[in-house]
Amino acid sequence: MKILHIDSSITGEHSVSRQLTASVVAKFTAADPSAEIVRRDLAADPLAHLDLPALGAAESAAILDEFFTADVVVIGAPMYNFTLPTQLKAWIDRILIAGKTFAYTAEGPKGLVSGKRVIVAIARGGFYGPGAALEHLETYLRDVFGFIGLTPEFVVAEGIAVGPEQRTIALGQADASIRALAA
């Protein structure tokens, strides 16, 4: 098994999403100690925002190849200003490629990716569950991966900035979600 581990939080060791992705990856490697892990830290080694020269660059091809060769993709996605970090958006721009991960057809867009598991660890300072007016992270990621043919799974720590007690509750709920994941 090959695991692509992606972190995008800028808060380093204080990051809840990094803590959650590490736990998800640990669960998978405990189940399969021979698993190969490819790690990409989008805060420590950011990708340039997509422009025409970057579109055909070798780096973009390498990112797409990492994605294609992974069996499991684990993504840390903290909510910044109601949505995803720009670092993560720059990565997504490298994997949403017409003719490679999706195609336009007479019936509408068609996802071309299958057989891959995507697990997204979300950390939100407040309470922004699905359907909340300002929630543009989980819904965006669900739509993005659905567009290319995948159904992401989510581990969510919600309300972590509300106070220490809520942070403990949120982390406990997220840990329970991780334990419930099939490895």
Image (spheres, helix red, strand yellow):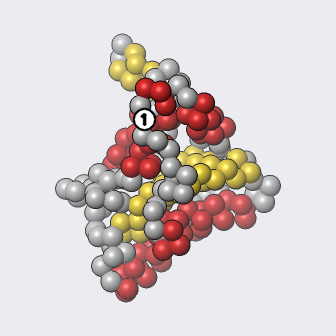
Name the residue at the bottom extreme. 165
In the rendering, at what x and y percent does residue 43 appear?
50, 56
Q: Nearer the viewer, residue 39 or 23?
A: 39
The answer to whether residue 82 shows anywhere in this view is: yes
**Element class at badge 1:** loop
Q: Is residue 177 visible?
A: no
Quadrant position of the C terminus in the picture: bottom right
Instruction: Locate residue 164 relative to residue 182 in the image: left or right.
Output: left
Q: In the rendered image, which quarter is residue 44 located in?
A: bottom right
Residue 176 image point, x, y percent: 51, 72
Using residue 89 as the reference point, say whether residue 13 is left or right of it. Answer: right
Name the residue located 67 percent from the left edge and 59 percent from the top edge: 28
Answer above or below: position of 112 versus 154. Answer: above
Counting from the top left corner in percent of width and height, residue 131 is at 25, 55
Q: Residue furthest right?
A: 34
Q: Is residue 44 above or below residue 116?
A: below
- Residue plotted at (34% across, 46% down): 140
Location of mark 1 (residue): 50
At x 33%, y 83%, the residue is 163
Q: Amino acid at mark 1?
A: Leu
Instruction: Give the crowd class for mark 1: few <14, some 14-19, many >=20 residues within 10 Å.
Output: some
Residue 78: horizontal and vertical position, in percent?
Answer: 41, 61
Q: Nearer the viewer, residue 51 or 162?
A: 51
